[in-house]
Amino acid sequence: MAGHSKWANIKHRKGTADARRSKLFTKLVKEIMVAAKVGGPIIESNPRLRMAIQNAKGVSVPKDNIERAINKAASVGGEDYQDLSYEAYGPHGVALFIECTTDNTNRSLQNVKSFLTKGGGSLSTNGSLDFVFADKGIFRFPFPEGKDEDEFILSLIDMGAEEVEIEEGRVNVQCEREEFGNMQKALAENQIEPESAGLEKIPIISKELNRTEAESLLKLIQNLENDDDVKAVYHNIAFSEDIADLF
């Protein structure tokens, strides 16, 4: 995670650069396969596949890997994947929203429960975190060269952005869930290609932790993220200077 962004609260990715990159590649390629299997291999008629490919290209997943994933999904047979989500509380009352894509729901549930139990957390009921998180569209891309920052922010707001953050040459754009498609189209019309885009859980209510508490919680999040079935883990840890270097 770059900089001291408030979006650093959204998802946590920890570990060495090579290990993190390899795990990310695997999960992005898996999402391409799932998207192609669920909605078909034709990119123009499959928004989920189009977004999955865009996100993969944003972190330089090789073209051959992308094409192989689509072809594998289009072939007869293969795994049947499902999208699942689990709501939980970690230690110190931190809310966790865990998204999975799996071909074995029993395995995913048992793994998630095991990580939570070992990390001092527990599953909650579906809908229990509705008051903690809001679904928002998030777009990330480099700041375009030659643009005036203030004018560019205003142009993004005109496109439908709810919030814009620019830091260290990176742009994070947030919009309402219902405006995601319109924002995506507006960026494309202005020749802006996001490195990543999608609907994410943004915390409405944050939880402040001291450094010791944050370290134990982030270890649990890391263990969850390292599971092959887990696509994303969202939390509501309040970002502070005291724990900045942990992210």
Image (tube, rainbow, N blue to C red):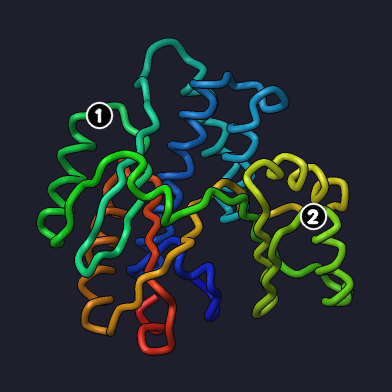
What element does badge 2 sit on? loop
Residue 75: x %, y % from top left: 47, 15
Image vertical order of residue 128 relative to residue 15, above or below: above
Quadrant for the C terminus in the image: bottom left
Q: Is residue 25 or residue 187 the one in the foreground?
A: 187
Q: Position of residue 214 (x, y in %)?
A: 28, 76
User: Which label lies toward us, 2 or 1?
Assistant: 1
Most foreground residue, 153 or 71:
153
- Residue highlighted by disc 2: 192
**Quarter of the image holding residue 76?**
top left
Residue type of the residue flagged with mark 2: Ile
| Amino acid, disc 1 | Thr
Distance from the alpha carbon under mark 2 to that under mark 1: 38 Å
Q: Which residue is drawn at 81% across and 61% down?
A: 156
Label 2 Cα crowd, 10 Å radius (few <14 / some 14-19 / many 20+): some
Q: Mark 1 points at which residue?
A: 105
Q: Where is residue 167 in the image (x, y as percent from the top left)?
A: 65, 78
At x 18% / y 43%, what residue is drawn? 111
Residue at 81% x, 69% y: name it.
153
Q: Residue furthest bottom?
A: 242
Q: Vertically, is 47 above or below 205?
A: above
Q: Is mark 1 on a helix, strand or loop?
A: helix
